[in-house]
Amino acid sequence: MSYIATTFNVMIASPGDVASERAMIRDAVYEWNAVHSISRKIVLLPVGWETHSSPDMGASAQEIINLQVLEKCDLLVGVFWTRIGTPTERHISGTVEEIEEHIAKGKPAMLYFSSQPVVMDSVDLDQFQNLKAFKTSCLSRGLCETYDNYSEFKEKFYRHLQLKLNQHSLFQINASDQQHTEINESHSKFPNLSLEAKILLKEASQDSGGTIIHARYIGGSAVQANGKNLIPSDDRREVAKWEGALAQLVREELVADRSGKGEVFQITNLGYQTADMIAL
C-alpha cells in the first residue's frame, strides 16, 4: 500500500569504536518506521558518510561529507565510547565537527556516551582525554545521556526517539506539507539474524583474529568478541539471549567452532561477507 509521507534524514555520527551502537540506531529507526510511519505520515531515513557520500575532489574529506550528507540531515544522533575520532582542519574530530555544525544550524541532536567497561591497555589515552573534555563541554550546553550496556542503549534510544518525534516542532507535519515518498524494500540476500547475532558478528569481524570466545564459569557465562564481553549481566535471560545469538551464527555457518568444544569460534568467509552487509 502506497501513502503520502514526509522523509526526515537521521545522521548517525560517531567514531569507529561504536559500530554495534550504529547498527542498533538503524534498527531502532526501521522499527519506528514499521510501527508509526503510516499513522504519522513520516518516514525516517538513517544516513551516514559511509553509505551516503561519494568520491569527490576540491575540498577536504570532512567538507565534502558536510556538503553531501550533513547539510541534508534533520536529526543527528551522536555516540561515543573511548574515542573522539580523527582531527579535521576546524575541529578536534570529524564527528565533533558534524555535531557542532548541525547544532549551529538550530537542528536537534541526541548525544550518547557509553560507560561500558574497557581494557585500558587498548585505549588511546589522548583520544580518551579529548573525549572527556568534549563530554564536559556538551554537558554544560545541553542534556546528554549515558548508558552501561547495549540493552540499556537500545531501550533508551528507542524511547528517546519516540519522544523526539512526538515533541519537537520539526516533526509536526501538516497534510499540506507532505510530499510523496516511495519506500523501497531491500532485495539483498541476508540471513534473518537477531539483533544480538548482528552485534556479535559485527564485533567478531572487527577483531584481528575474527574470534569469539564462549567461556562458562560458576555462576555465569561470557561471550567475548573484539575485546568485549557482550553479556551485560549474569541474569540467565541475558545469558540465554547471547548464547542463542552465537548458536544462530553457527547454524547459519557464519562462524565455526575451532575448538570442537563450543569455546572458541572464528568467523567464516561467509561471515565476513555478511558482516560487511550489516549497516552501520
Image (cartoon, helix red, strand yellow):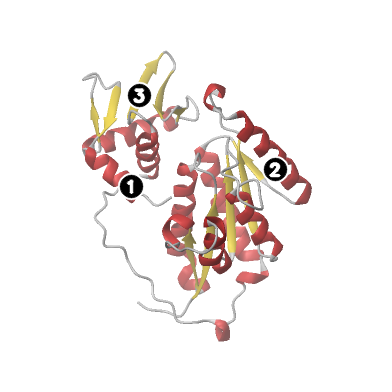
Q: Residue furthest top?
A: 218
Residue 64 is situated, as x and y percent measured from the top left of the image, at 52, 62
The amino acid at mark 2 is Phe
C-alpha span from label 2 to label 3: 34 Å
Q: Which label is found at residue 213?
A: 3
Q: Which residue lies furthest to the right in this view?
A: 140
Residue 82 is situated, as x and y percent measured from the top left of the image, at 58, 35
Question: Does residue 26 appear to the left or right of 100 in the view shown?
Answer: left
Mark 3 and mark 1 in contact (Cβ < 8 Å)?
no
Which residue is at a point 62% across and 60% down the rendered structure image? 164
Residue in the foreground of this view, choosing between 221 and 111 = 111
Q: How crowded is mark 3: few (under 14 residues within 10 Å), some or many (20 or more)?
A: many
Q: Which of marks 2 and 3 is nearer the N terminus?
A: 2
C-alpha span from label 1 to label 2: 31 Å
Which residue is at a point 57% across and 30% down the rendered structure image? 124
Q: Which label is found at residue 134?
A: 2
Residue 32 is situated, as x and y percent measured from the top left of the image, at 48, 60
The amino acid at mark 3 is Ile
